[in-house]
Image (cartoon, coloured by chain):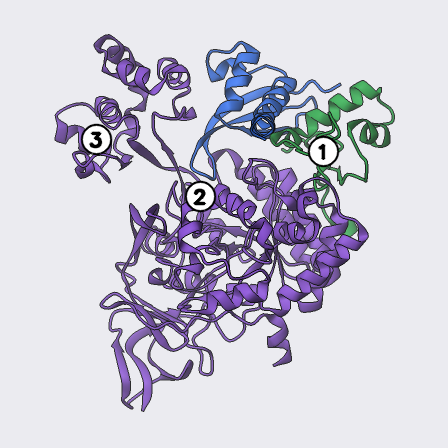
Amino acid sequence: MPVEQLSRVRKSILPQVGDDWSHIASRELPDLSEKDAIASLQSWNLHVYMRAAARMGTGSNNILPSDVIFVEPPLAHG
Amino acid sequence: MYDLVIRNGKVVDGSGLPAFKADVAVMGNRIVKIGQVPEAAREEINAEGKIVAPGFIDPHTHFDAQLLWDGCAKPALAHGVTTIVPGNCSLSLAPLKAKHRMKLVGMFNQIEEMPLKAFKEGVVWDWETFSEYITRIRKGLAINVAPLVGHSVIRLWVMNEAATERTATDAEIAEMQSVLRECLDAGAAGLSTSYVDMDEKLLPVPSRYADAREVEALASVLGEYGRVLQIVPEFYDSDLTIARLDQLAELSLKYNIPTTFSPLFMNADNVDAVNRVMARVDEQFARGARVWPQVQTRPIDISFSFSVPSLLFMRFPTWYKIMRFGTPDEISAFFSDSENRVKLIAEAAPLQGLWPTLVLRHVETDANQKYVGKTLKEIAELRNTTPVEAMMDLSVEEGLEAHFLSAGMGHNDDAKVAGLLNHPRVHIGASDGGAHILSFSTYGDTGYLFSHFVRDLNLMTVESAVKKITSDTAAIWGIPERGMLKEGMIADIAVFDPSTIARGEEKFVNDVPGDGHRYVRDSHGVDTVIVGGGIAWSEAKGYQDARGEVLPGVREMVAA
Amino acid sequence: MSGAVISRVELAAAHDGDAELNVTLQYENGGQTLVALDEYAVRVLMDSCGASTPDGLIGQGWHHVRDALEAASNRFVNSNSTQQ
């Protein structure tokens, strides 16, 4: 089965170097205001808040380099 | 004359094909004949009425520390498990620099609940490299070990404190690749990583600070050896699990490696989610990727005492309030007050269905030991009271250290779990053997598979259950010459009675170095366990030969 | 801006043998996600929502869940930093 034929799943990205909510918001959700884009991203990625990103040392940026970040809400199934 | 013959048993050879009556002859460490064996042997086992199967392989364990003082990985061997895979979830005990020992001990304490005292009194720290650790555990090994090396540990070796602060540089990633090669050359069966686990400070383990570039670089090394990548995904969320298995699939296809993720649980509220995960697994296998989900056989139990607030009572405001805000003395006084008791009893009325299954699992006083293992309903009858009052009275008598267990609260829909266990692209595993030792027993999942799903519910055949935990596992993990009963194969064999095999009741024992305790389950119905042609354990004589090996990985098999 | 709200709460057994609360969030597109909260996070969430029972959480906004999870996670950072 070619990769193009995989069924659609919820769209996600992996963080790039230096990414925080603001960077991801401007890159992935350019049509929204920064405030709304960040709020949307956070609401779609509550798993990021299930642990502290200790010692990453970047204040409010709690995204870990290994995180999966969803850039859309969960798909509606059935 | 043969060294060993197992006579009159029903052979379930691990292929999944129907059982057949035959004798099994062993010379040295190998099976030399299956069929009619008229010749005598130095040792004979009468397996009349029993099943003769390949030894079971447990692919998800945390026996890393226990192997330092117990080469049998007790009680796994007695349950018929002849091969274990430790080093899961990004954590192994090597490679480990001396300066990092206490940090890793803390991580093992957090994840396995292995007491610090056990490391102090049970461990001679005479290794740093993976090779030295392997040499260390080989002494007195009675069970086979196919050890994973942990990503978090490799990261710690290369990056020191920065392992939990930042992504790695190109030079550090190259060094991690070299370290991984050394581990694989020394016998590591693969690499484990985790996107979930927490360290000794309840902060993310080092592997969670790695970016995808680092994981891919390590996967490329696994590709050189054809060895396994194991991960713990964010299993509580199906979209995250799917995203991780997609990552695994790309690595599997690009580097031609087997990958596995664990655990995958089936609860009443996530049936659709698990079905979506499995649909994705099917699609990725159709592409040629190997992404094996691991599913455990046992249900999840909830344990609690009144010394720590438990959400089990959160729908009962009076109970929950006193658990949340009361000191131990206040809780005891509250439970002893007659007016409060009336209120508590009335509020707990909806729990009526729980009493026959809620078990007392641990007490401190000698006086109440006689109630351990009994349900609250049974205890109430013995004490001439009601179950809810018995629970409060025992808690008060034990200074709130009466521990209760509510069995089968999760992963408990038998038909649906059986559907997963039977699925051709599901890998039975995730026992976590050797972990959570102070919370619950992680031993006896194979006994539970045969007693519950095969015998009691008839939802699996014994042949397919054996295949799933023997030849399938060996094939997935690239473990050569084991997992099947066939002439020429190494003689790892479990002889068990299909009518009685089961996991025993959970019990709290004091067998951890440093006067430590853990929950275990004895095996029932397992007659004899053979490792490398020697009797490693029998019901009659207990633990015997120690012929366990650190198993060669795929490279050796390919070379052979 | 996301208007996801809590649509369901259910007690569940966590992998480590503790009881946890599974909170389902419903998004505006009909999609759902499930978040597991430990006892500490539930306590913060209920206080933040002014809820006295789990069912009182239904209809509350997603940001309460975010803040409860963050508070529960940060307690480890804070306890570690004060110990050091």
User: In this orientation, does residue B222 appear?
Assistant: no
Q: Quadrant of the C terminus of chain A?
A: top right
Foreground label between 2 and 3: 2
Image vertical order of residue B474 relative to residue B94, above or below? below
- Residue found 31% across the figure and 91% down from its top: B1
Work out whether disc 3 and disc 1 sit on a shared chain.
no
- Residue found 31% across the figure and 87% down from its top: B37
Say what secondary structure mark 1 lies in: loop
Q: In green, which chain?
A: A
Q: Quadrant of the N terminus of chain A?
A: bottom right
Query: What amino acid is found at the position of numbered circle 1 in the picture?
Result: Ile
- Residue found 59% across the figure and 49% down from its top: B100
Query: What amino acid is found at the position of numbered circle 2 in the picture?
Result: Glu
Marker disc for residue B377: 3
Q: In blue, which chain?
A: C
Residues tagged 2 and 3 counted as in contact (Cβ below 8 A) = no
Q: In purple, which chain?
A: B
The location of residue B32, given as percent across then percent down, is: 41, 85
